[in-house]
Amino acid sequence: MAEKLKRPLLLVGCGKMGGAMLEGWLASGIAAAGAYVVEPFGADAFANRRDVTVVSSVEELPADLSPQVIILAVKPQAMSAVVGAYAKFATPDCLFVSVAAGTTISFFEAELGPQAAIVRAMPNTPAAVGQGITVICPNAKATAQQVADADILLQAVGETARIEDEALMDAVTGVSGSGPAYVFFMIECMAKAGVDAGLPEDLAARLALQTVAGAGHLARQSDDTPDQLRRNVTSPNGTTQAALDVLMADDGLQPLMTKAVAAAANRGRELAG
Ligand SMILES: NC(=O)C1=CN([C@@H]2O[C@H](COP(=O)(O)OP(=O)(O)OC[C@H]3O[C@@H](n4cnc5c(N)ncnc54)[C@H](OP(=O)(O)O)[C@@H]3O)[C@@H](O)[C@H]2O)C=CC1
Ligand SMILES: O=C(O)[C@@H]1CCC=N1
C-alpha cells in the first residue's frame, strides 16, 4: 500500500456497502490515521477493531475531528435527513464522497454549501475483498489532490474509473453497482437448474459457484476476450452450443439483461427525486 490518508476518514452509514468498503480499507491499511463510523445502532463488526471508533450520532464525534474524507453511505431516501448535520465539515480541505444511488452532486451542493468538495461514486460490494470497481465523478470544487485521494481510497478496495458526465452514473449503477446481485442470482439459477437436471443440491451449488468464480478469474487473467473464451468452450454441435442456442435466442439473455440494466438505471433517476 503506497499511499495512506493523512487525516482520519469518517464513514456515515456502515451497512452493506459502507461496511464492505471499510472492511477493504482496514485490510489495505489506507486508514492509518484512523476511521470514525457513525451508525445509529452501532456497527458490531467494527466495534473492537483497531483504529476504528464507532459512534451512534454525529454529536458523539470528537469536537476537534478534522476528517480528510467523509464517505456518505446511507440510503438515498435517508440522505436529506442525514447530510445537513455534516455541513459543518464542508471546508475546502474535507472531501465528501457519496456512494448513494441516484443522489446528484447538485443535491449535495445545496445541502452542504457551494464550497463543498464532492465526489459522487458508485462502488460495489466486492470491495469487501478488494475486488470492487468504483466509478467516480467529482464536482468543480474538488481539487485534483482530492480527486486523487478519492481514487486512492477506492483503489484500495478494487479498480476505479472516472467519468465527467454525471448523467452516466445511473447506467454505471445498472451495470456495476447492482451488477454483483445479477451474478449472485446467476449462481442461484445455475444451481437450481442443476437440481432440476437431477443433481444433489450441495453438489449443484458447488458446481455453480466455482464455475462462475473460475470463469470470472479466467476472463480476467486471459488475453482472450469473453467472446473468444465462450467460443473456446463451445464445440461445434456440442453441449454448450445446445445451451447457447437457448441463451442467445432473440428472446434470450441479452434482451433480458438490457431490460434489467435499464430498469436499474431508471430507478436511479427516480431516486434523484
Ligand atoms: N448495497 C450495495 O451493493 C450498494 C449500495 N450503494 C449505496 O450505498 C448506500 C447504502 O446502501 P446499503 O449499504 O445497501 O444500505 P444499508 O441499509 O445496508 O446501509 C445504510 C446504513 O446507514 C445507516 N444509517 C441510517 N441513518 C443513519 C444516520 N443518520 N447516520 C449514520 N448512519 C445511518 C443504516 O442504519 P439502520 O439500518 O439502523 O437504519 C444502515 O446501517 C445507498 O445509498 C446505496 O445506494 C452503492 C453501491 C452498491
Ligand atoms: O440497490 C440499490 O439501490 C443499491 C445501489 C446499487 C446497489 N445497491
Image (cartoon, rainbow, N blue to C red):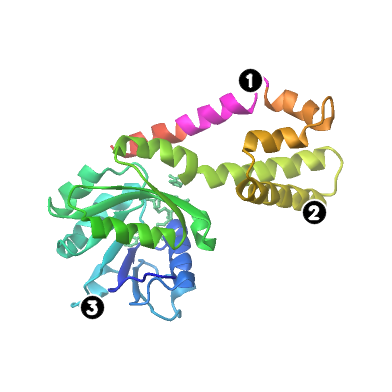
Which span of residues is magenta-colored? 249-262
Q: Look at mark 1 in the image and give the residue it sits on.
A: 251
Per the image, label 2 sits on a secondary structure element best described as helix
Residue 179 coordinates in the image, percent (x, y) = 52, 43
Per the image, label 3 sits on a secondary structure element best described as loop
Q: Which label's residue is closer to the chain start, 1 or 2?
A: 2
Residue 72 visible at all: no
| In this rendering, the label closer to the viewer, 1 or 3 | 1
Looking at the rendered image, the quarter that the C terminus falls into is: top left
Q: Residue at x 41, y 60 (%)?
A: 18
Query: Is 166 drawn above or below residue 203 in the view shown?
Result: above
Q: Nearer the viewer, residue 175 or 76?
A: 175
Q: Residue at x 60, y 44 (%)?
A: 183
Q: Residue at x 27, y 43 (%)?
A: 104
Q: Look at mark 2 in the image and give the residue it sits on.
A: 202
Quarter assignment of residue 116: bottom left
| CA–CA distance in space, label 2 to label 3 | 50 Å
Which label sits on residue 219? none
Q: Are marks 1 and 3 in contact (CB under 8 Å)?
A: no
Query: Is 51 drawn above or below residue 171 in the view shown?
Result: below
Q: Nearer the viewer, residue 74 or 261?
A: 261
Q: Which label's residue is closer to the chain start, 1 or 3?
A: 3
Q: Look at mark 3 in the image and give the residue it sits on.
A: 62
Does 207 lie within the magenta span?
A: no
Q: Mark 1 belongs to which amino acid?
A: Asp
Query: Is 137 drawn above or below residue 171 in the view shown?
Result: below
Does 254 lie within the magenta span?
A: yes
How many other residues sit within 10 Å of disc 3, few (<14), some (14-19) or many (≥20)? few
Q: Mark 2 belongs to which amino acid?
A: Asp
In the image, taking residue 239 as reference, residue 154 lies left or right, namely: left
In the image, taking residue 10 as reference, residue 30 lies left or right, namely: right
